[in-house]
Amino acid sequence: MGRSTRYTDPENTPAVMMEESLERRVFSAEFDDSLLTFKIIAGRDGKNAVISSWKDPIRDHSACVLEVEALLEVHAEKSKLYKREKRTLKNWETGFQLLNSRPDDLRTYIELKDGMKTFMERLAKVKTPEEHEELEAEYRKFKELQGRSERLLEAQQMLERCREDLDEALKVMLQASKDLEAARKREEELAELISDDHVESSKRGIGMQELFPKIKPGMVISKLHHIDLEDLSYDEVMKQLHKARRPHYLELKRYDYRQDVLSGEWASLQEQRVLGRFVTDPRVAREAFVAAGRRGEYGDIELALHRGEDVNATDTTGCTAFHHAVANGHIECMELLFAHGANIEQRDSNLETPLLQACRRGNMRVIAWLLERNASLDAKDKQLRTAVFHAILSRNVPLVAQLVQLRTAMTVML
């Protein structure tokens, strides 16, 4: 029993497994402003403009709008707090003024209170009755003013705390105002980054990738308004994009280099293989697309075409999705593929066209569909077998008779 071949030598990778060996197809699209649509970076050696990722300013703008709304609430709350602290201070100032109807008494009490700290020491040092009487008078005055004055001092402390709270509330409110203003400025700046394409994608409820399904990160800008840009310096390409009229009509192609996410260095696909890094085998997507034609998976075929798959991509036998759809009688898939440019005369590795395969299967409905679209009855496979010969192999006598009649009619007309 034979073994399947595994290619473990990256320096001798078969061309069929190398994406760079395939033709670089052109994908065209019109963008309102490509500078707003993509993040664009310089390619290898500072040349070319490579699509790095899609920009999503609507998401960022929406997040910023939510931030502004939240900061508006914060600002309103902090403003309310400031006003409340301001009213509180005013109330305490008014109350303190009413309570402190004799400010001289309070000043006297504060002086006496300070003297009470050393009262006993001074009393011990008294030598004359006059001095004793004077200290007693001072103590009586202190006790007389103590109750009212202490309440006033407590009120004065509360008044100071109110002033401190007001100062703090003012600082917090001013910071909230500053944060709100900065967020509003960011919101305005982000609004300027929203292109008509972003608006359209938002209306449809899809992302930019779905709006431009054939355009993918990693592609290189090849042309702008039909002017060649490939292999120019990155700075020159960006200069052209900045001064170009809008909308931007771009042509993009596959870029056969990959950037290291850590070092930022670019390497060719072959250099990547030699380094032992994974490089996509182009056959995978192609085989999946062709297999969808064989299974008649209309949705998968439609999605692949929508995303830019080559309608005439072939599998290892040289068959296209159209070949397989024809051979298996999937007429809806045939119609879809044909509408997208499937080659009705495409040859597989045996040089069989879709019509030859249909004749071998004997599917009259499929054959009628192909003939209505002028599929050639003159096509021959590798063994020079015609459609009539394949119909004979199918043992479908009515089909053989119909093809012979058609071929005879064509000969007479010639």
Image: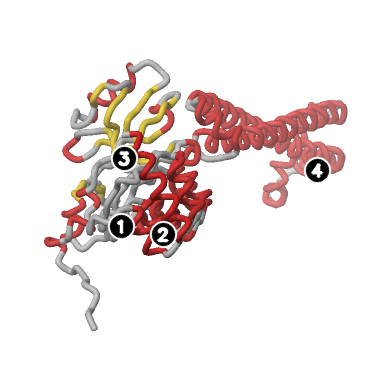
In the rendered image, which quarter is residue 51 located in? top left
Q: Residue 12 placed where, x, y %? A: 12, 62
Is residue 273 rendered to the left or right of residue 303? left
Neighbor class of circle 3 (other Cα within 10 Å; few <14, some 14-19, many 20+) is: many
Residue 291 circle label: 2
The Cα atoms of the two marked residues, 3 and 1, are separated by 19 Å
Q: Which residue lies under the disc numbered 1?
A: 283
Q: Nearer the viewer, mark 3 or mark 4?
A: 3
Q: Which residue lies under the disc numbered 3?
A: 219
Q: Judging from the image, what secondary structure is the residue with disc 3 in?
A: loop
Q: Judging from the image, what secondary structure is the residue with disc 2 in?
A: helix
Residue drawn at the location 19% of the way across and 29% of the way down: 233
- Under mark 4, the amino acid is Tyr
Of labels 3 and 4, earlier in sequence is 4
Q: Is residue 9 visible?
A: yes
Q: Which residue lies under the disc numbered 4?
A: 139
